[in-house]
Image (tube, rainbow, N blue to C red):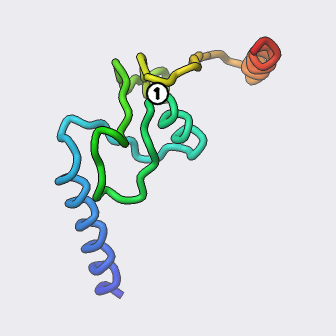
Amino acid sequence: MSSNVEEYQKIVDAEWRLLYNKLDRDMFCAGHVAEKDWKRRMKARGGADMTTANDINSSVLGQCDYFEDRQVGGERFNIFQGCVNARTYKLILRGGAEQFFEETEFNLRIRW
């Protein structure tokens, strides 16, 4: 069994080496992004989905004028500003009752 774990770790290490060698060193990397959020962000920045790191170049990465990884309360948010195709806004709401969030979401959906 230990050889299976060791073989798996070799594959993971090889993938990380490939990504590390292909990417700029000052690039932010998110651990997990929900698919709907990923697609929305890629569309806003003018990028493309990639299934391999072999063909990474500026035409598939997309762009934005400003990016920040921000801690708000107990959660982290990625803030993108000045995206080439952005037509949305994100509101960060904090409150004590779930009903507050549900009412806010309902009212936003009605108006937009």
Looking at the rendering, which quadrant does residue 84 occupy?
top left
Where is mark 1, residue-wise?
77
Quadrant in the picture for the N terminus: bottom left
In the image, residue 62 above or below residue 56: above
**Which structural element holds mark 1?**
strand
Task: Indicate left or right for 107 with 91 as reference.
Answer: right
Task: Indicate left or right for 110 with 28 as reference.
Answer: right
* Residue 102 locus on image (x, y percent): 78, 22
* Residue 65 locus on image (x, y percent): 34, 18
Which residue is situated farthest in the front direction here? Answer: 59
Please, what is the three-letter code of the amino acid marked with disc 1?
Phe
Q: Nearer the viewer, residue 92 or 39?
A: 39
Task: Indicate left or right for 98 with 95 as reference.
Answer: right
Q: Nearer the viewer, residue 89 or 32?
A: 89
Count of marks placed on residues: 1
Q: Nearer the viewer, residue 54 or 34?
A: 54
* Residue 12 locus on image (x, y percent): 30, 67
In the image, residue 76 above or below residue 47: above
Q: Nearer the viewer, residue 65 or 75?
A: 65
Q: Residue drawn 57% across and 46% down?
A: 35
Looking at the rendering, which quadrant does residue 108 occupy?
top right
Q: How packed is label 1: few (under 14 Cα within 10 Å), some, or many (20 or more)? A: few
Quadrant in the picture for the C terminus: top right
Q: Residue drawn 46% across and 48% down?
A: 49
Q: Residue drawn 40% across and 46% down?
A: 31
Q: Residue drawn 38% across and 34% down?
A: 62
Task: Indicate left or right for 63 with 88 as reference.
Answer: left
Looking at the rendering, which quadrant does residue 88 occupy?
top right
